[in-house]
């Protein structure tokens, strides 16, 4: 994958299926940044990587900017966005841990 690559992501949010089109906008050894969006929301996902002992520390920050009437709902969906962030980090951790144990074995 390289800067400019695009893909669609379909996920469930608050019981509804949501589709966003993403694009990779920054690819550096210690940083990846994706932007995404649809008519309701624009997102920026920023991942940074740093050595941490024998592993890697990953920081993942996601920013959501709502559009139109959805902007009014922003404060009411904060809890759902926090849960989404927690679920995303748990899934990322599982996938990377599994990949690490496969590479070691």
Image (tube, grey):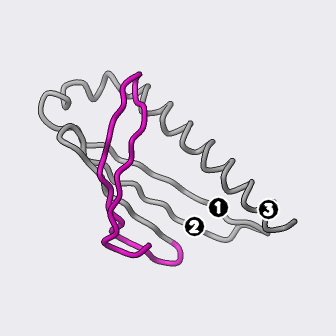
Q: Are marks 2 and 1 in contact (CB under 8 Å)?
A: yes
Give percent across and percent down for residue 61. 45, 51
Nearer mark to the viewer, of 1 and 3: 3
The label number, if any, that marks residue 57 in the structure image: 1
Mark found first going from the N terminus, 2 or 3: 2
Residue drawn where x is 68% and y is 65% of the image: 56
Residue 7 included in the magenta stretch of the image: yes
Q: Secondary structure at mark 2?
A: strand
Question: Residue 9, relative to residue 25: is it above or below?
Answer: above
Q: Earlier in the sequence, mark 1 or mark 3?
A: 1
- Looking at the rendered structure, the secondary structure element under dot 3 is helix
User: Mark 2 against mark 3, which lies toward the viewer?
Assistant: 3
Disc 1 secondary structure class:
strand
Crowd tier of the residue under label 2, counting other residues whose Cα lies within 10 Å: few below 14, some 14–19, many 20 or above? some
Residue 37 shown in magenta: no
Estimate the x, y position of residue 47 in percent, counting from the top left. 49, 60
**Callout 1 environment at 10 Å: few (<14), some (14 to 19), or many (20+)?**
few
The residues bearing labels 2 and 3 have C-alpha atoms spaced at a distance of 21 Å
Magenta range: 1-30
Q: Quadrant of residue 23?
A: bottom left
Q: Looking at the image, which residue is at 58% across and 45% down?
A: 89
Q: Is residue 69 left or right of residue 2?
A: left
Measure how far apart labels 1 and 3 are at the Cα level: 19 Å
What is the quadrant of the C terminus in the image?
Answer: bottom right
Reading the chain from its start, which is encountered first: label 2 or label 1?
2
Instruction: Tell me the residue that label 3 is attached to.
Output: 102
Q: Tell me where residue 68 appears, x and y as whole percent.
A: 12, 33
Closer to the camera in the image, 92 or 21: 21
List the residue tagged with mark 2: 49
* Lateral position of residue 56 relative to residue 24, left or right: right
Q: Which mark is residue 77?
A: none
């Amino acid at each position: 994958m390289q800067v400019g690559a695009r893909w669609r992501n379909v996920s469930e949010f608050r019981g509804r299926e949501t589709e966003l089109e993403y694009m990779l906008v920054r690819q550096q050894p210690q940083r990846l940044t994706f932007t995404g969006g649809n008519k309701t929301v624009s997102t920026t996902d920023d991942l940074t990587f740093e050595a941490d002992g024998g592993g890697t520390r990953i920081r993942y920050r996601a920013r959501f900017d709502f559009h139109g009437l959805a902007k009014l709902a922003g404060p009411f969906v904060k809890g759902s966005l926090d849960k989404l962030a927690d679920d995303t980090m748990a899934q990322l951790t599982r996938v990377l841990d599994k990949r690490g144990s496969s590479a070691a074995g």
